[in-house]
Amino acid sequence: MKRRASLLALLALAAAMPGCAHYYYYGERGGPAVRSDVLQTNYEAADRLLQTAPLDPRRSVIVATLVSVDHLGESSRLGRMFSEQIASRFVQRGVPVSEVRLREQLALQPGQGELLLSREKREDSENHDDQAEVVGTYAVSGGMGYLSRKLVSTQGNQVVAATDYALPVDDNLRGLLRGR
């Protein structure tokens, strides 16, 4: 009788496991219905970068698309949207932001955005007198998304400001992560 109960419990556990694996990468569903204030969180991250960065208000900054830490050549809707929000906050705070999509020389990757983690693209920013670039990565582990942003000087590629933050992966973020 005990053996049969143990076998049934083991079968029930095995049947439940494939359903768990489906949501592993983007976090579990069905948790608390708390939504992160993504916009405010990104604005606060931009403010932290600006607090320590010695920027010239007459020279522009480039904001690159946030990329996956595991695949620096890939992004998602989350990476593109978060970068747009950072760029908006810089402009709101009086820092000019170059719109790189208007530059013919900067090769954009369809479905990925403006990826500036390469030497050629850095040289492009130097040729246009941009003073700095905002670059960053994201990763997801369990139910959290971890983001790292750096403000990098175009002269010497020195990091002049950095900030890290985390957001719970709710249905909203999960949708942005899945979208290309």
Image: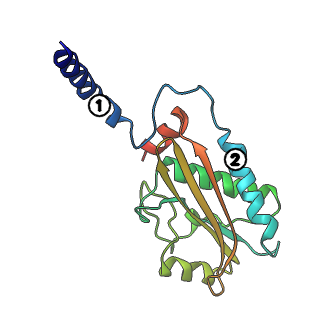
Numbered disc 1: secondary structure: helix
Report x, y in % for residue 134.
64, 67
Badge 1: residue crowd in 10 Å (few <14, some 14–19, many ≥20):
few
In the image, taking residue 156 as reference, residue 51 lies left or right, namely right
Give the answer, above or below, for where 172 lies relative to 139: above
Quadrant in which the N terminus appears: top left
Report x, y in % for residue 98.
66, 67
In the image, taking residue 110 as reference, residue 130 lies left or right, namely right
Q: Amino acid at mark 2?
A: Thr
In the image, taking residue 132 as reference, residue 170 lies left or right, namely left
Residue 95, visible in the rendered structure = no
Q: Amino acid at mark 1?
A: Met
Numbered disc 2: secondary structure: helix
- The answer to which of marks 1 and 2 sits earlier in the sequence is 1
Which residue is located at x 48 percent, y 49 percent?
A: 140
Residue labelled with disc 1:
17
Residue that sits furthest to the bottom in the current view: 156
Which mark's residue is nearer the viewer, 1 or 2?
Answer: 1
Q: Which mark is residue 136?
A: none
| Spatial CA span between label 1 and label 2 | 34 Å
Residue 28, visible in the rendered structure = yes
Foreground residue among 161 and 154? 161
Image quadrant where residue 147 sits: bottom right
Which residue is located at x 83 percent, y 62 percent?
A: 94
Residue labelled with disc 2:
41
Give the answer, above or below, for where 97 lies relative to 80: below
Give the answer, above or below, for where 74 lies relative to 22: below
Which residue is located at x 23 percent, y 28 percent?
A: 14
